[in-house]
């Protein structure tokens, strides 16, 4: 006689909501430990924001240009175990009123701005400008930028870009946003200070494919469209969607900044000679033009370029940048307190933690979550 299915026995150990880097790393690691996982994603593809679409044989970064960089050898080795990375070095240019400047701010930029050739000359000009405008403790992005690089760089390369990127005056933005841009007194156009940097050979989809290999995935599947069903089929949920939506917006909606991408095929092999050109003046409505083939040193006959337009966020748009001001951080703190009381749900990734994270930070945090989870949950110890 057939036996009754074991009541209460779930089909999956883990339901993973979201196939971005966080969900994919978690799913890979749990599967490696013998756990049965199902990944669902509301989009029609896996990979979250690192997803690329092949157009004209070029990997087009559909959700904004992505360059992997890290100082953490373990994270670098981990991603390289799924796909080899090339040595692309990000060296964006800034176009201000038709003139080009190197980024990040370095001796090349100072030469282009002022004709100075030595670090001492550059330092003197910057110091003079800082003296004019500095305040003892910078309270906002404008004050922070002026006290780091002075008025010329602020006016030409920061103010316009920042205000269109964030949709508000630089005096109303937190200082920390600008602190991640290096200022160097060497002729070095590398945008990042990290030891390791590159793009997966063959594109970011290869990384996600490697992570999710052999794992069941359902795309075009929104967790909230059938929440009871999804909660029912797995012992644990790993949630990488928006935390405010998870709690029915009980404490209000978290705010974001969004982006609109205009992709275009151009019938020429090389449009701008560089992957990233920023447009730093306020009057040009986009912040940057990306030419995707340069990330992988492409030699295709045509090229694909993308103009990136910052936009106000509304719930039907993609949530790209969290607005980590006091108001929103306060709302998030209330959701976080609820999340900490959950015993069966793990929250991770940029949307569930309402935090801007680079990819290496997401990989590191997913690996950390895995290691804490699989060693503290006694039932789940497999190693
Ligand atoms: P996501 O990639 O957003 O994945 C979350 C997934 O969950 C999505 O696929 C979404 O569809 C899915 N989902 C959400 N809600 C639901 C639901 N209800 N049901 C089912 N599925 C759901 N980092 C770098 O290191 N270098 C860079 O150069 C870089 N450039 C960037 C440029 C831009 C414009 C942006 C916005 C980010 C950039 N980043 C960069 C950051 C990088 O994108 C993130 O670190 C990383 O992609 C976050 O992964 P995640 O898994 O947390 O989130
Ligand atoms: N930024 C700027 N001018 C530039 C590039 C960046 O003023 O040409 C400022 C801007 O405020 C931006 C911040 O530096 O939000 C961080 O830049 P980053 O390139 O790290 O932004 P992301 O690629 O994450 O959008």
Image (cartoon, rainbow, N blue to C red):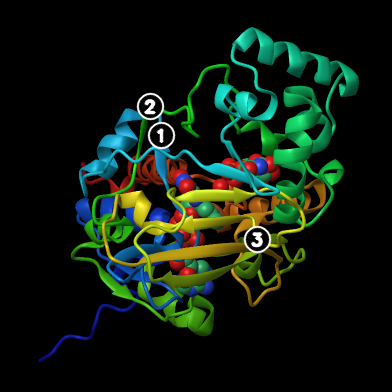
| Residue 242 percent coordinates (x, y) | 59, 64
Asked where in the image residue 155 lies, by quadrant, the reply is top right
Label 3 or label 1, whichever comes before in sequence order: 1
Does any portion of residue 166 appear in the rendered image? yes
Q: Considering the numbered disc 2 on the image, is that residue within a helix, a strand or a loop? A: loop
User: Do tag 2 and tag 1 residues touch (Cβ < 8 Å)?
Assistant: yes
| Residue 125 percent coordinates (x, y) | 75, 16
Are there few (<14), some (14-19), or many (20+) residues within 10 Å of tag 1?
some
Q: Say which residue label 3 marks.
A: 286
Q: Say which residue label 1 marks.
A: 70
Residue situated in front as seen by the camera: 233 or 50: 50
Q: CA distance from mark 3 to mark 2?
A: 31 Å
Q: Considering the numbered disc 3 on the image, is that residue within a helix, a strand or a loop? A: loop
Label 2 or label 1, whichever comes before in sequence order: 1
Does any portion of residue 239 appear in the rendered image? no
Query: Split into 4 quadrants, where in the image is the N terminus?
Result: bottom left
When the figure is inspected, residue 360 is found, relative to residue 341, above or below; the finding is: above
When the figure is inspected, residue 69 is found, relative to residue 322, above or below; the finding is: above
| Residue 193 percent coordinates (x, y) | 47, 27
Name the residue: 39% across, 64% down. 60
Q: Say which residue label 2 marks.
A: 195
Name the residue: 60% across, 29% down. 109
Horizontal placement of 200 versus 15: left or right?
left
Name the residue: 44% across, 50% down. 275
Residue situated in front as seen by the camera: 130 or 34: 130
């Amino acid at each position: 006689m057939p036996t009754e299915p074991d009541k209460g026995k779930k089909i999956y150990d883990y339901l993973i909501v979201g196939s971005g880097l966080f969900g994919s790393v978690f799913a890979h690691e749990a599967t490696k430990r013998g756990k049965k996982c199902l990944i669902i994603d509301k989009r029609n593809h896996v990979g979250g924001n690192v997803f690329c679409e092949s157009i004209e044989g070029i990997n087009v970064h559909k959700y904004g240009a992505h360059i992997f960089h890290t100082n953490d050898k373990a994270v670098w080795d981990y991603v390289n175990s799924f796909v080899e990375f090339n040595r692309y070095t990000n060296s964006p240019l800034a176009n201000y009123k038709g003139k080009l400047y190197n980024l990040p701010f370095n001796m090349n930029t100072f030469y282009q701005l002022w004709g100075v050739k030595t670090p001492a000359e550059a330092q003197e000009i910057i110091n003079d400008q800082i003296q004019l405008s500095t305040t003892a403790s910078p309270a906002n992005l404008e004050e922070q930028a002026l006290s780091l690089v002075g008025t010329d760089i602020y006016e030409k390369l920061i103010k316009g870009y920042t205000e269109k990127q964030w949709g508000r005056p630089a005096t109303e933005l937190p200082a920390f946003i600008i602190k991640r841009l290096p200022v160097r007194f060497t002729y070095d156009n590398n945008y990042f200070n990290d030891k390791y940097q590159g793009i997966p050979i063959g594109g970011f989809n290869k990384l996600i494919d490697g992570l999710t290999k052999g794992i069941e995935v359902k795309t075009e599947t929104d967790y909230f469209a059938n929440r009871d069903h999804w909660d029912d089929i797995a012992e644990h949920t790993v949630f990488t969607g928006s935390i405010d939506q998870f709690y029915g917006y009980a404490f209000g909606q978290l705010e974001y900044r969004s982006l609109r991408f205009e992709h275009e095929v151009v019938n020429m092999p090389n449009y701008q000679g560089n992957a990233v050109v920023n447009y730093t003046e306020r009057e040009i409505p986009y912040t940057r033009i990306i030419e995707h083939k340069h990330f992988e040193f492409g030699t295709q006959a045509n090229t694909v370029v993308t103009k990136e337009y910052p936009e106000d966020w509304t719930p039907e748009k993609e949530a790209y940048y969290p607005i980590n001001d006091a108001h929103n951080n306060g709302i998030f703190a209330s959701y976080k307190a609820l999340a900490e009381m959950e015993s069966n749900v793990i929250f991770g990734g940029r949307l569930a933690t309402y935090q801007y994270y680079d990819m290496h930070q997401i990989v590191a945090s997913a690996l950390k979550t895995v290691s804490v989870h699989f060693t503290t949950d006694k039932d789940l110890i497999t190693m």
